Image (tube, rainbow, N blue to C red):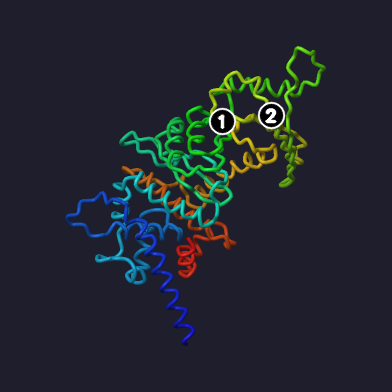
Amino acid sequence: MARMTKALQIEAENEAQALQLFQAGLATLPDPRRAQGLRYPLQTVVTIALMASVCGCDDAESMQAWGEAHEEWRCGFLPMPHGAPTQDVFLAVFGALDPEAFNTVFRAWAELLTVRLKATGKPIAIDGKTSRRSFDNVTNQGPVHTVSAWMSEAGLVLGQRQTDAKSNEITAIPELLEVLDLREATVTIDAMGCQTAIAKTIRDGEGHYLLAVKDNQPTLHEDIQATFAEADDDRRRTVDEQPRPAVEVFEHTDKGHGRVETRTVSLCRNLTWLTTAERWGGLSFVARIVRERFVEATGKTSKETAYYIGSDRAATAATAADKIRRHWSIENQLHWVLDFAFREDEARHRAKNTAANMTTLRHFALNLIKSDKKRKLGIANARKRAGWDRSYLVSLLTGA
């Protein structure tokens, strides 16, 4: 009996510690509501929404139901003078809350996680995702598009920036990069982010860039192709010709699910054939990756070639290959999870800032679950367990 009492006491202390941590983090969040007639404290509303999101609640109605079901427990830690918030309260708060202020709180908390997990200086992938049903035909407002920074090795979202269209990623990416700690990190971005201003922002932040190059930078794209064409040409050269560029090659083959994929990465530090090299601050190398895929069921082979520029002088073909491959984890470990475990594409939040703030809330919840390195369940089942098992929910909160 004494042991059980002691265990309950420890659990209660952990619960208090976790909630105090989140309340302290939210203390700097400005309340957009008028003080007159205020019934529900901002920290209480946001903390309950976060806990409910971890437990599998994806809309305001289910957050209200979760809050009512756990009202007696949370009254011991959260100020709730009028009981659990209703769905109208959740929608009103997240509709009025300043998305950038909420992002600032999220980034500060994410940075603490990266320090604890010793994840600073690791590869950071930048990519955008559209919440497809967040449009509003009444106000002619398009769906919210979110550009996220993803640290693949730690499995954490470091920050995000909301825009109203994918075409605005070019302006959103530098804004996001400027508020991140980029020191010693390698930032990977797809071809849309291959811009001289973005490369400069990364270098100014003491980070390295590894950017995909396509036809949106036609001269650079053609020059890189010419570089590797010269490297592949093994003809004998005359004394007045430039020597063939030296290339380092790394090859890796994967087999699974009835497919065999071979990736060959070639890295060249000879920038002689690049007519615009001086525009890219800190440019150190160009890279080519050839992906050849054989499908056993059909007997067909497909091949694609992609090109990159990078600034890290210490990079090798093998490390470049690893970072390029890690970049795409943002698709299957973040975007896919948000769609299938958090049902983001089905979310119909539209009013004011609700869609943008709910995206940040999902990132909050996902980071909480991802930070549990002993987790054996997938994200969807981990959310279910948190809803069923209060001690597991508390362990997620205190672990972060």
**Residue carrying label 2:** 268
| Residue 238 falls in image quadrant | top right
**Residue 262 pos. (x, y %):** 74, 38
378, above or below 334, in the image: below
As rendered, which of 219 and 45 lies closer to the eye?
219
**Residue 4 pos. (x, y %):** 47, 83
Q: Which mark is residue 282?
A: 1
143, above or below 240, in the image: below
Q: Amino acid at mark 2?
A: Cys
Mark in the foreground, 1 or 2: 1
Q: Amino acid at mark 1?
A: Gly
114, above or below 75, in the image: above
Residue at figure coordinates x 41%, y 65% from the top left:
18
As rendered, which of 61 and 292 lies closer to the eye?
292
Element type at marker 2? strand
Residue at figure coordinates x 52%, y 30% from the top left:
192
Sequence-first tag of 1 and 2: 2
Instruction: Single out the residue that lies furthest toward the right.
Output: 236
Mark 2: give few (<14), some (14-19) or many (20+) Cα within 10 Å.
Answer: many
Instruction: Single out the residue that lies furthest toward the left.
Output: 36
Element type at marker 1? loop
